[in-house]
Structure formats: structure tokens, C-alpha cells
Image: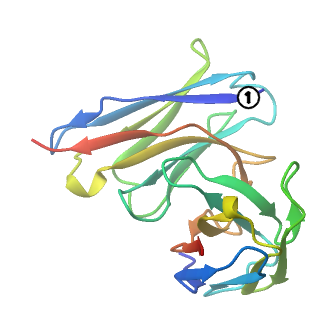
Amino acid sequence: DIQMTQSPSTLSASVGDRVTITCRANQTLSTWLAWYQQIPGRAPKLLLYKASNLESGVSSRFSGSGSGAEFTLTINNLQPDDSATYYCQQYHSYFSFGQGTKLEIK
Amino acid sequence: QLQLQESGPGLVKPSETLSLSCAVSGASINSDGSFWGCIRQPPGKGLEWIGSISYTGNSYYTSSLKSRVTISVDTSKNQFSLKLSSVTAADTAVYFCVRHRGSVFGVVDYWGLGTLVTVSS
């Protein structure tokens, strides 16, 4: 099974800041990597797929990069609505998720 | 607009079988290129893929649950179903029905609202 590790586990930033979340896999994924945003009490929402492709309707403040075994999610110009937990997910071999990064907006 | 709606028992006794139905609206469950799955999330924890099924009926499961799980499609009701046998407290979670884009191993682009299933006597 492919193991996914996100860092940091928690993150606190201010409105207008830029933040970066890292996701590492224990084997190469090519670019079969997605990012999801989950607001408490709600289902996750797809943000990016194939590492860097922005899902339709998602703000361009979200961007992704990486390939192989290391990936990043960057959120520019943080807004209060960005307060959520973010998960990476590999879909190179079945599916597995990172443990999540909880983002708090100060 | 595609929508997924979970319906489950809410409470299941240990050692019994958890049965969850996922109603699909806005699309035909067995149309060419339709792929469906189930993901769960224990309270306060992360996401775990359970399994997925293609419109042709081919199913795939996570290795840790493979011996206890079955996902099937009911075309007459336009829904798919999850059965998880011999449940324990560790199976307490919010269960989500999902759609995969493009293939049974595709990214998840639609999620149901989720339903909490508690395993307790």
C-alpha cells in the first residue's frame, strides 16, 4: 500500500498570507495526486487533480505542483473561508489519503 | 447535476453487518464511464478509501477490509450498496458515497453528504 504523509499537521496564518502544504509518498506517483478541502461537518471538495490541474469552479488562489513522490499545495491571499482541513490523495495505485493538514485563519 | 444520497442504519451492533445504500440522481448508474465508490471517516480522523465499483460491475477493495466488504450495483434502483460484515467499534465512521471521474481509479469529483454509522451494543 502507498503511504502518504502531509506536513505540517496544523497551520495557522493570517488573511492575505500565502501558505504551502507538503505531501510525500513512499513511492513514485507520477502526477496521480489530488487535493481536497474539507470544512467541518461537510464532505470533502476536490480542489486539484493530476497534481496541478485546478478543478472547475475552484479559486485560482489554489495551486499545486510536484511529481514523483513530493507535492505541494499553495494557497495565495488567504481568506477566512479557507479555514478547513486539507487532504492529499494518491490515485496511482488504488487510493490512499494523507492524514490531513488543519489550516486555521488567525 | 449529479447527486449522491447515502442511507444507512445509524446504529449497528458489534459482529453484525453494516448495510449502506447510495442513491444516484442526475445520472444513470450503469451508463458507460460510470464509476462509484465508498470512503469513510472515523470521528475526528482522516479519510479512508473502502472500495469502488465500475459500471460493468468490477469491484476493488482496500486490502485491510477486503475480507469483510462487498460493493454492488442495483440498476433497477439506480443505486449502489456497501456491505461490511463483522463490524466492531473501529468501523464507527461517517460513510461517504462517491463518484470517480474517468475510471474506477479516477479522482473523486462528487461526494454524498455522508452518513454517520455507529457500532455499539
Residue designated by label 1: B2
Q: Is residue A50 left or right of residue B27?
A: right
Q: Residue B67: x, y in percent?
A: 35, 53
Q: Quadrant of residue A63?
A: bottom right
Q: Residue A84: x, y in percent?
A: 59, 63
Q: Residue A78: x, y in percent?
A: 76, 71
Q: Is residue B30 left or right of residue B115?
A: right
Q: Chain of mark 1?
A: B
Residue pictured at 82% horizontal, 72% vertical: A51
Q: Residue A25: x, y in percent?
A: 64, 84
Q: Quadrant of residue A66?
A: bottom right
Task: State whether residue A54 is above or below residue B81.
Answer: below
Residue pictured at 60% horizontal, 63% vertical: A95
Task: State whether residue A4 is above or below residue A50.
Answer: below
Q: Quadrant of the C terminus of chain A?
A: bottom right
- Judging depth in this view, the residue of B15 and A33 nearest the camera is A33
The amino acid at mark 1 is: Leu
